[in-house]
Amino acid sequence: MSNYAPFIKPYVEYNEHGWGPCEVPELDVPYQPFCKSDRLGKICDWTAMVPEKKFPSKYASTFGNNSQYAYFYEDDDSTFHLVDTTGSKATKPYQRGRYRTNMRNNVRTRGRTGRGTPNIASLGGSTAGGATASTTKYGKGRHTRNTQNVGRRFGRNAPTRIRESSVMVQSNWVSIEEIDFPRLLKLALPNIKEGKDIATCGSLEFYDKLYDRVNLRNEKPLQKMARVVHTVTTTDDPVIRRLSRTMGNVFATDEILSTIMCCTRSNYSWDVVVEKLGTKVFLDKRYNDQFDLLTVNETSVEPPMEEEGSINSAHSLAMEATLINHNFSQQVLRIGDQEQRFMFEEPNPFEEPGVDLASIGYRYRQWDLGNDVVLIARCKHNAVIQGPNGDMQFLSIKALNEWDSKVTNSVEWRQKLDTQRGAVLASELRNNACKLARWTVEAVLAGSDQLKLGYVSRMNPRDHLRHVILGTQQFKPQEFATQINLNMDNSWGVLRCLIDLVMKQPDGKYLIMKDPNKPMIRLYDVPENAFDSDRDEEESSEPLSNSNDN
């Protein structure tokens, strides 16, 4: 045995706290995470002067654009030029029978040379029984050209657009659950009764019926209304704080509920903060968030792109649509000191001296979702109108906006709104399915008698500051939900599913987020101080927090 080399037992480290090495050496080496689904581009492209506008994130990384591999230079040699050494092609004179291209498959020369009979089978002209279908002389070339471009307009070969998340997911967040949309679409919670009013606050102005007569020949300019709309979140509402002491265990606002209940129609990323305290759950929105901005063409085949400085970027259109919706909902009212107002039982909880508040009536309603889940939500109305029998009917007023019909490939309102209003509405349902569904759910939750939609367009497609009102249209919320194929049983089922998931978790703060690039909802466990910096920035930036002032 002494002739053999000794066997030394190697030392193997054992990680008691997880998988992987116990210690990671600190190396000053740049590292960038990668994903197998990322597209690989060129290593170096000397001919590309500017990035591609239509698909700027074609070769972007899933984890964001990191600049650790970027090349930075200090001095630029401006005297360096590329010299084109390729010789120019000499134009040769045309001679009869020479320097001709292949004329056999040329469609435009058929019938003159007699060569190359057209292939009827390739054009779909062959019929059963051996006979050939008759085609016009110019129909062949037109058919061929159209079939070659199929798919380019509708982006079938276009790369997948990578959207940004509404909030950056941190490394210390714990993923609890992932639910895809096909599973959510199968949920249902039937037999949910109408909400019961437990408190009503604020006052409402009456709707001006003159705006029902607005049409393309009698359009009215949209005015800027200097009124403040408070968008206070759930935990900052003094009425909800008062009600949470004696009743209910789930609290939210109608905007948050409509976002969750219509999540299967959304494409953009959004998030809702959930705080669980004992048996009570509060659904909140983050401070300094874009949660209240209205999306534009979210469900379109080609949604707006993010271009800095462009009036047609996604963020600019969202700001424009939000201001249009605010101005329209206040302009169509009978405003004045002498005009009659409908007063609720309690005053506006967000009223401040010297501030002109918008006409909004708040209704705090209660729903029983079963299994001891009692939901209390703040809903709102925009106006009131006197019905034919003398009863008061509450309205939810919203505005659809047109920015450029040529860019969106949609119906032009100034030509079709009076004669083919159904086609205009169908186009909006296709391009803004999520936004219209959210408006409908908000009207149903509030118990509005009518949903009033206004059609507002730009005076000039290149001017995003001036708009005109082209017409109005009204619906009953329940009937409109049926028309747009909105299943309220499924919406209640989605909400109940997420509430049950949170109820099973220990006390703490959680985040419900829509995945930016997948039809999926994610639930995260986040630290208690995860969004405290957003609150500090919001309080320091504006004296009137959580308000939109136009």
Image (spheres, grey):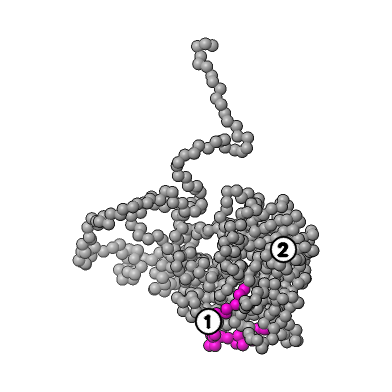
In the depicted structure, whether residue 115 falls above or below residue 178? below
Q: Is residue 428 rendered to the left or right of residue 464?
A: right
Would you identify the image quadrant in which residue 149 lies? bottom left
Q: Is residue 37 rendered to the left or right of residue 79?
A: right
Give the camera-side residue of 231 and 14: 231
In the depicted structure, whether residue 330 falls above or below residue 368? below
Residue 388 in sight: yes
Q: Where residue 515 appears, x then y in whole percent?
A: 58, 57
Residue at the extreme top of the image, as rendered: 2
| Local secondary structure at mark 2 | strand
Q: Where residue 237 appears, x then y in whole percent?
A: 69, 67
Give the camera-side residue of 145 and 211: 211
Marks 2/1 in contact by CB < 8 Å: the verdict is: no
The residue singled out by tag 1 in the image is: 468
Residue drawn where x is 55% and y is 58% of the image: 165
Verify whether residue 215 appears in magenta.
yes
| Local secondary structure at mark 1 | strand
In the picture, the disc for residue 251 is 2
Verify whether residue 324 appears in magenta.
no
Give the camera-side residue of 226 and 369: 226
Question: What type of secondary structure mainly makes up the magenta span?
Answer: loop
Amino acid type, label 2:
Phe
Residue drawn where x is 36% and y is 66% of the image: 117
Would you identify the image quadrant in which residue 384 lies? bottom right
Q: Where residue 322 appears, x then y in whole percent?
A: 57, 72
Residue 124 in sight: no
Give the magenta range: 206-229
Q: Is residue 406 rendered to the left or right of residue 339?
A: left
Q: Where residue 300 appears, x then y in whole percent?
A: 54, 67
